[in-house]
Image: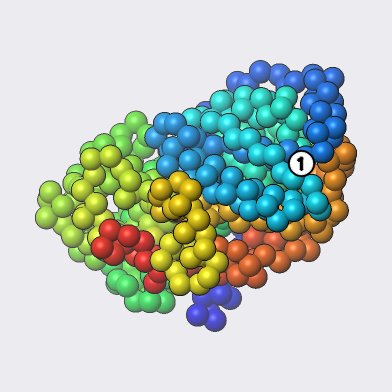
Amino acid sequence: MKKFNKIMSVVMASAVTAALFAGCGNAETGTPAADSSSETEAANETASASGVLKIGGIGPTTGSAAVYGIAVQNAAQLAVDEINAAGGINGVPIEFKFEDDECDAEKSVNAYNTLKDWGMQMLMGTVTSGCSIAVADKTAEDNMFQLTPSGSAVDCVKYDNAFRVCFSDPNQGAASALYIGENAIASKIAVIYDSSDIYSSGIYEKFVAEAGNQPFEIVSAEAFTADNKTDFSVQLQKAKDAGAELVFLPIYYTEASLILSQASTMGYAPIFFGCDGLDGILNVENFDTSLAEGVMLLTPFAADAEDELTQNFVTAYKEKFGDTPNQFAADAYDAIYAIKAAGEKAGITPDMDMSAMCEAMKAAMPEITLDGLTGIGMTWDASGEPNKAPKAVKITDGVYTAM
């Protein structure tokens, strides 16, 4: 494990200097012009006068990626309620407002402008990488502090006002190869990835690079695109013919559910291993979840973990929302508590303007340490990247279990 952590540190450093769950918003935004300065100033004055800290959130609560956005919205609200009950940030309560972007970059920018009109002083979002990148261009222009819980593409944190809770795509790819190799899970690996998606292709590239250092062979690597993502028979047949014992899927859960179903139909039963994009596969409508039994994925959170923080969070989440939280929920919960820690370190107050608050938060983030759901002793670089140990889970009896 020392070797694992050492290599992860190198990978994380290289991801920072390279300065790509992206696939949900790769189109040009074509967004309208930003709000006028007078409108923004009026919104900020309203926030100051209200005596609250206004934190906005953006993500998909409708559409194909709604599982992610709803989890983020719910968990962030849960954290906000807890913090407010305990006295807020520096004695000031948080007001939280979440906007749906339908996993569309243009709509995400529109949501950002809506939140600015509301008086948002900092942003917890967005949820998906394509949207996060589009909005990051706007937060950089405004010098607003942005912390994405789950935007994993490298460019989500390309500006100095932007930070993230999750690992970047390159980190996930390298860590997956390292985990498979160090734990001798399989000796022959196939990969099926989406070449039209920067999340998927970014993970794939780093997975292949690290695979060269591991005791396994990539015997098949087959791509698909957004225009052809319903029939995976060719990719699966090539993996089967090559004798792949494990199929690595750096893709999203919807496509993964189709792959698992089609593999079962053709009598192919390898180990399936994915990254955070697979989190949500148990909630796909009309999917036989028994086909996901034994699926492994690199993710920072397992709801069955026995530590007190996780169990308290899971209990509170289930009581409030009637569902078991996923890793996106955990990322969001940690994001709000990271904002609290940095806000207290920075001494932020509601009367600070957006830019001054951002400067204070940027300086504070590399100075805090957070014991969160997704990592103990989490820290951040000034580059916006988190430092924490990776984890993996396995689907057993229909639930995610820690490995």
- Left or right side of 7 for 33: right
Amino acid found under the numbered disc labelled 1? Leu
- Left or right side of 297 for 16: right
Residue sitting nearer the eye, 246 or 115: 115
Residue sitting nearer the eye, 116 or 207: 116
In the displayed structure, 289 sits above or below 225; it is: below
Query: Residue drawn at (22%, 62%), measured in percent from left and top?
Result: 270
- Left or right side of 119 for 76: left
Q: Position of residue 80 (x, y in %)?
A: 64, 48
Q: Position of residue 367 (x, y in %)?
A: 78, 63
Query: Residue drawn at (44%, 31%), measured in percent from left and top?
Result: 62
Q: Which residue is mark 1?
A: 53
Q: Secondary structure at mark 1?
A: strand
Residue sitting nearer the eye, 121 or 382: 121
Question: Which quadrant is home to the C terminus?
Answer: bottom left
Please, which residue is most extreme toward the bottom here? 2
Query: Residue drawn at (76%, 56%), measured in percent from left and top?
Result: 342
